[in-house]
Amino acid sequence: MKKYGSHVPAFAICGLALFSVTYSCPMFVEFYPDPKEISDAEGEYVEIRLDDFRAESLFVRMESKEILAFAWPDAERLVLVHDTVSCPVRKNVACGLLGKTSLPNTRESVWYVWSGACMDSVTLPQPKPGKSVQRVGLTDEWAFVEGTKGSADPDYEFGIEDCALGRLSAEFADGLWNVTAFLAGCDSSSVHVRTLDVFGAGGWMDKDSVVRDGFSVVRPGGGALWFHAELPEDAAPSNNVLDTLFVVRSGAGSAARESNGSLAESPGRFSGMSPVRVTEVHHCPEEPMPEWVEIYNASSFPLPLDAFRFCDRGSALGRAGDSILPFQTVLVCKDTMALRTSLGIPDIRMVQVPLGFLNNVEGTLRLCYRNDALDSVYWDKGTVACPSGFNPLTGRREFTPGFQRKSVKKEMSKRFFEYKLSSRVVSKKGAALRLYVESEHDVVLGLLDSAGRRVWKSVVPSMSNGWVRVPVQEHLGIGAGYVTLSVGESEDVVGILVRP
């Protein structure tokens, strides 16, 4: 990290001793000079830390530009912006206007803030697009980080009241998740916890409690658990929330995961397939079709697209509020208009993401939930020959954009229900066909005739876990027929024979 010298004119400096953790005077802590996604006028800001210092007025100046004067705000932080619309709405945070002062994007700049005999002056390094410039403690060093507008950055600021959610671990064994989290920077706090068994039907479970040091949550579930914990807002709210998706890896019936995102594996009942996973990759399609990747939500709940991305490339797969619906398939590419024109299928959902280029000869894709990799795909010259795409689940050639093969749906169906038939051959005058269904979901049963037409439909309620009668004699004629079981778009079809 480069160190920049402080530009100090002939004013008294108070409360900026390098070995003190008490900020007695106003001081600069953060600058955001060069927003990447929006204009500078909309996004740039300057943040000044005030703490409990009090005076009548405050003055700010960049180099020889006009002096900005402010009545002393009743706040712990002052954020200078161009438009009050972009002022952060937080307790103990006030806003002032930068006026005509603009933050330079391509060079160093010198800034002053003073009140009475107290002054802080800094030399700001040349900005990096999209990065905030954060002061490191009480030094003259600066770090390029993600912005924390209107709040403290706990990684760099000293002397702040910060209760954080620290180390997180999870274990899955015998159908039970055990998640443990610890507090950091405080002895106790109230906490709100939400958990969701992604492959279950029970919905969210909420719990509020006051904890000391840490807490544990035990919940039955399948191979994936959505975990959200939140502490009350403090000076550094960025570490008050934990939101992650725990997934048991391939075939794991017992797994342990630490906060680094790794999962241990051991044999067991659950397949451990990620709820959202890559189901088709076209890394070298024929021109003019752009490269595209297909993802599928195999769970029974909508999941937030803004939390998913391809690790180390592109951006989030959606904006805040966007979801991938249960059993929905989405195509991801960098030119959705060209892809839709090439495919000629208007009703497929597509997401535009700057993926870069996929290597034609050998490459890897990893799908991340926030910072944790959930699924990975690898291909080389031996996978498929260009211009064919392939299904990572089978490793074979595939071109079914927006749709899942029956083999995939059948594999997914095993996650949602188990069943067995009393017989595959039924006499027209004999005993009725019975079907045993075990599931945490409502399972839709159906009968299809030999032409594939649905002639009967019923619903087995979740957790019924018992035998049900299927009225074959009443609805099917002599010959072949089919029994269907489905949860959402996950379906299994079983052939039966009706005899005289």
Image: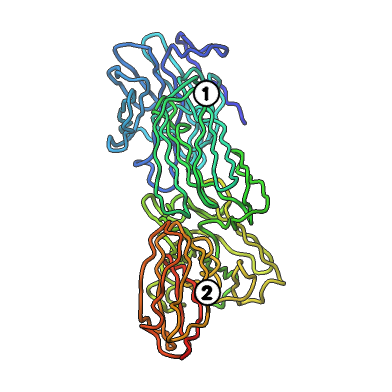
- The residue that label 1 is drawn on is 213
Q: Quadrant of the rendered structure where residue 195 is?
A: top left
- Closer to the chain start, of discs 2 and 1, is 1
**Quarter containing the N terminus:** top right
Q: Quadrant of residue 407?
A: bottom right
Mark 2 lies on residue: 405
Element type at mark 1:
loop
The 10 Å Cα crowd at callout 1, few under 14, some 14 to 19, many 20 or more, is: some
Give coordinates of residue 134: x percent, y percent. 50, 30
Question: Compared to 417, does 217 lie above or below?
Answer: above
Q: Looking at the image, is 418 positioned above or below residue 451?
A: above
- State how the image is colored: rainbow
Q: Name which residue type carries label 2.
A: Arg
Q: Is residue 272 left or right of residue 56?
A: right
Task: Report, in whole angstroms, how far the alpha carbon at label 2 lies from the one at label 1.
Answer: 49 Å
> How busy is the neighbourhood of tag 2: few (under 14 within 10 Å), some, or many (20 plus)?
few
Nearest the camera: 346 or 244? 244
Mark number, residue 74: none
Could one spot residue 366 in this view of the protein?
no
Q: Position of residue 40 (x, y in %)?
A: 38, 42
Report whether 417 appears left or right of 97. right
Q: Identify the residue at image location x=50%, y=27%.
A: 154
Tag 1: residue type? Answer: Asp
In the rendered view, tell whether residue 470 sits above or below residue 123. Answer: below
Residue 143 % position (x, y): 55, 32
**Residue at left 60%, top 67%?**
393
